Amino acid sequence: VSTQSTGSSGINAEYGGGQHLPLGGQGYGGQQQPPSGQGYGGQQQPSGGPSYGGQQPYNPATYAPKTPEPVAAPVPVEKPAVPEQYTPMLQVLESAVGDCKNATQNPTHKRKLDEVTVKLDALKEKLRYDCVSGNVVDELNGIAGALHVKDYNQALFIHSRVAQSANFSEVGAFLPGIKVLLQIGAQLHTVHHY
């Protein structure tokens, strides 16, 4: 018993000396605690539960995240059609992509040709909104003409001329893809003569 007393007096001395914890209904500072079932301030509490000062006990359902209301899907904006004068050129370029995909079994070629398709979509976007100069369109028509007769050397020559003379901000989104198409087409044409 004396060891507990010494231990608690050491704690008591450290934390304010000599005060003892309340026992048996006595509150801190000699205040009487309310009888069971009665909260602070004289409020009647249901028996068996602690007082919350008039607040309701925590209920997880009250704080559960609410299900977001469905948001209407955005209405797609109708893009203008690509002007008809560009259709023959685009058809030749897309046909060349298809011919190359059919002629190769090389997975690297197939992946690069998929990237070419993305670049051709960028070309369509620029043509749709008239963002390609007349000189570049003329050169692209020249490339398409050479591709139509499978003259890859001529198509590559025209491509290099466009690459040297055009503004990169105008052609950078699609011209590298056309070059890849021409290079793969030239390799496959040499091997397969498709």
Image (cartoon, rainbow, N blue to C red):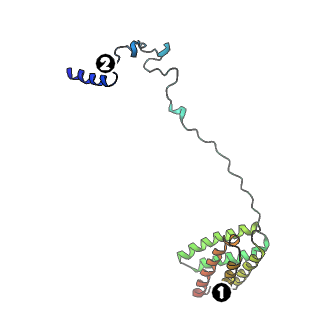
Identify the amino acid type marked 2. Gly
Asked where in the image residue 177 lies, by quadrant, the reply is bottom right
Q: Quadrant of the C terminus?
A: bottom right
Could you classify mark 2 by the number of other residues whose Cα lies within 10 Å: few (under 14), some (14-19), or many (20 or more)? few
151 vs 59: above or below: below
Q: Is residue 108 visible?
A: yes
Could you classify mark 1 by the number of other residues whose Cα lies within 10 Å: few (under 14), some (14-19), or many (20 or more)? some
61 vs 190: above or below: above
Asked where in the image residue 31 lies, by quadrant, the reply is top left
Q: How many marks?
A: 2
Task: Indicate the position of residue 154 as horizontal and vertical percent values.
Answer: 68, 86
Residue 15 marker: none
Q: CA distance from mark 1 to mark 2?
A: 102 Å
Q: Is residue 44 visible?
A: no
Q: Which residue is mark 2?
A: 18
Identify the amino acid type marked 1. Asn
Q: Which of the two labelled residues, at mark 1 and mark 2, occupies the earlier sequence position? A: 2
The residue positioned farthest toward the left in the image shown = 2
Left or right of residue 118: residue 57: left
Task: Indicate the position of residue 34 as horizontal and vertical percent values.
Answer: 43, 13
**Residue at image point 66% right, 46% down:** 71
Q: Which residue is mark 1?
A: 153
Task: Name the residue nearer the viewer: 149 or 26.
Answer: 26
Mark in the foreground, 1 or 2: 2
Q: Quadrant of the N terminus?
A: top left
